[in-house]
Image (spheres, helix red, strand yellow):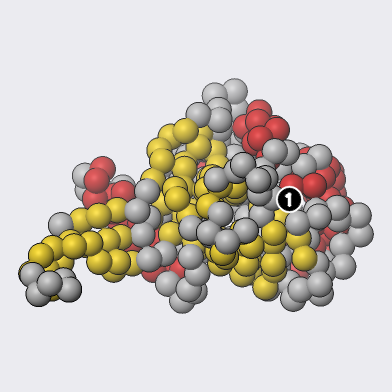
Amino acid sequence: MFNVPGAENEHANKEQNMRVMEYNLPFTKAAKWVTVLATSCWHRANPAMHIEGVMRFIERAKKHPWKHHGDGVEGVLAGDKRFAIDEHKEPLLDAIKWTAGTIESARKTCIGYILGNHDYTPSKEIGDVGEYIAMCAGVPYLTATCFIRFQAPEGECVGFFCHGTGTAQYRTGEPERKTANRQVKLRDILKPFHADICGMGHMHTSIVTPPCLEERLTVDDDDKVKRRPVIVRPNWYYAAPSMFMTYPDDKPGTNYAEMRIYPAKDLGWIEYDIGRDGTIYCVREVYETGETKMEHEPTVVS
């Protein structure tokens, strides 16, 4: 059961199991949809964290429901193979306090905090860091995986959310194929879970896979053969980008991602619009500047 001191989100039903949460979307009488935000992978305590992007997100999050997909802190301790004395200078407790305080500033609209792998690593030594961040911020702790029932005035939307696992690093092939490979990889990771929308973080890459409709021959009520769109994949999938700069201009060569020559990663967050009947109309990829990178709607293929 939710038992979070100081939680003030009036739309969250806290008398629920942590893995299944009910959330009443804050519709006004005139609103056609409510926009929900998703952020992930801030990595506080790493100098490559994009603080300006985080604060820009938080300002928008104060006006919309949002959730954090984990890795709010770097969580790399001295015994970790990724540890670098010049890089990991901020004590873990200070990083936790900063992350919790930042989340707390938008807690009234925060749906909850999900445990990430960077949160989990130090948890093996000092206790559940994800739960502690959520408790200090005064928001629900959604554990490592959760289902959320978004309640709208005329319907419901079910979401499955986690921090996630795996990577989307494809260094060969044409750009279109790399994009398609990322979308397939995301669906494969989240395939065991069925919901209207499935979302994760972890990959530091912005990926959206919309529902797919395919034009197929069929017969109508007048016995006429014609093509019409048939839903072949009804679910939305997304991976939220990070706030971790792989190649920061002012600190060249200082982070483990650069040492391993990882490709430059996406910065920003995800937004999606849920209508009054619970339908998801679109999912947007948003840059860390707040500008929309791309807006996705259900796809129709021939």
Horizontal relation, residue 112 to residue 3: left or right: left
Q: Quadrant of residue 49?
A: top right
Q: Quadrant of the N terminus?
A: bottom right
Residue 176, position in %: x, y? 24, 46
- Residue depicted at x 45% and y 50%: 281
Q: Quadrant of the image for the C terminus?
A: bottom left
- Residue 42 in view: no
Q: Position of residue 300 (x, y in %)?
A: 25, 55
Q: State the residue position of label 1.
A: 110
Q: Amino acid at mark 1?
A: Cys
Disc 1 element: strand
The answer to whether 269 is drawn above or below residue 237 in the figure is above
Relative to 96, does residue 50 appear above or below in the rendering?
Answer: above
Please indicate whether residue 155 sits to the left or right of residue 138 in the image: left
Q: Position of residue 120 (x, y in %)?
A: 70, 63
* Nearest the eye: 174 or 20: 20
* Number of marks present in the image shown: 1
Q: Nearer the viewer, residue 282 or 293?
A: 282
Say whether residue 165 is left or right of residue 112. Answer: left
- Image: 73 above or below 147: above
